[in-house]
Image (cartoon, rainbow, N blue to C red):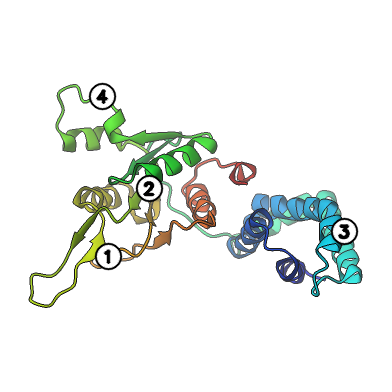
Amino acid sequence: MEIAAISRTINDWSNENRISLVISMLEEALIDKDFELFKFGCLEIQKWFNSAIKEMEEADSPYFDPEIYTESYRCIIKINQDVYEHEEEYIEFFNSSSNVRKYSVPIGDFSKVFIVHGRDNHSKIEVARFIEKLGLEAIILHEQSSSGATIIEKIEKYTDVGFAVAIYTPCDVGRINKDGSTEQARARQNVIFEHGFLVGKLGRKNVCALVKGDIEKPNDISGVVYTDMDDSAGWKLELAKELKASSYTIDMNKIL
């Protein structure tokens, strides 16, 4: 039984956020050819099997099959044992030029992440605490010393980083200057300006745009991908992956 089959089986049995996040990590590891993430995901799945049997039996789910559980458990143990015994071969495969995804490496401080935000303090703090949980320093502009500098000078000074996060929250409303047009929630203008500035300075791949709620997004920033800042915390995995792709050292254990 392959990893993909084991993952589908677990999804049928459990809606636990932690294991769902692990499965998402594992799927991304296979797509991106990320050996360390693959290894981590397989070990976490084995841990889940170690502890989940009692919960599965007590839940009395119509989807739970003890025989499939046992078979899947044995399979993941075998996979982890094979990875342990042949790690160099796995690394060679994952790192081969035909399999590895290439990323451009920006110039900047890879211990810091700059955060662009609006008036939603809760979202700002949530993102900042997650950045800090990963062992990085969250740079928030209004917390930095001004020393007589203008806002744009502060932005130029404190964006000497390798990565930035722009948080789009519904702080303002606006509409087209036309009769009958409907107002729509939108981010503060400073968020849009600073987002564009950072894309120009750091490169599009080194800026993550998090979007909270139904909000108007700029349609003239070519190639920008927006990630929903949902309650399931899936955005944390996406952000960690983007940081890792931008050459930050990320311990995926800290995401869970």
The amino acid beneath tag 1 is: Glu
Q: Nearer the viewer, mark 3 or mark 2?
A: 2
Q: Nearer the viewer, mark 2 or mark 1?
A: 1
The amino acid beneath tag 4 is: Ser
Q: Nearer the viewer, mark 4 or mark 1?
A: 1
Query: Residue 195's spot in the image, x, y percent?
Result: 28, 51
Q: Is residue 198 visible?
A: yes
In three-dimensional space, the C-alpha distance between marks 2 and 1, rounded to whole angstroms, equals: 18 Å
Query: Residue 66's spot in the image, x, y percent?
Result: 90, 68
Between discs 2 and 4, the one toward the N terminus: 4
Camera-nearest residue between 212 and 23: 212
Q: Which residue is mark 3?
A: 78
User: Is label 2 in contact with label 1 (beta carbons under 8 Å)?
Assistant: no
The amino acid beneath tag 2 is: Val
Residue at (48% x, 47% y) in the render: 243
Q: Is residue 95 visible?
A: no
Q: Which residue is mark 4?
A: 145
Q: Which residue is mark 1?
A: 216
The amino acid beneath tag 3 is: Lys
In three-dimensional space, the C-alpha distance between marks 3 and 1, rounded to whole angstroms, equals: 49 Å
Between discs 4 and 1, the one toward the N terminus: 4
Q: Crowding near pointer 1: few (<14 within 10 Å), some, many (20+)?
A: some
In three-dimensional space, the C-alpha distance between marks 4 and 1, rounded to whole angstroms, equals: 32 Å
Seen as rendered, the residue at the extreme top is 147
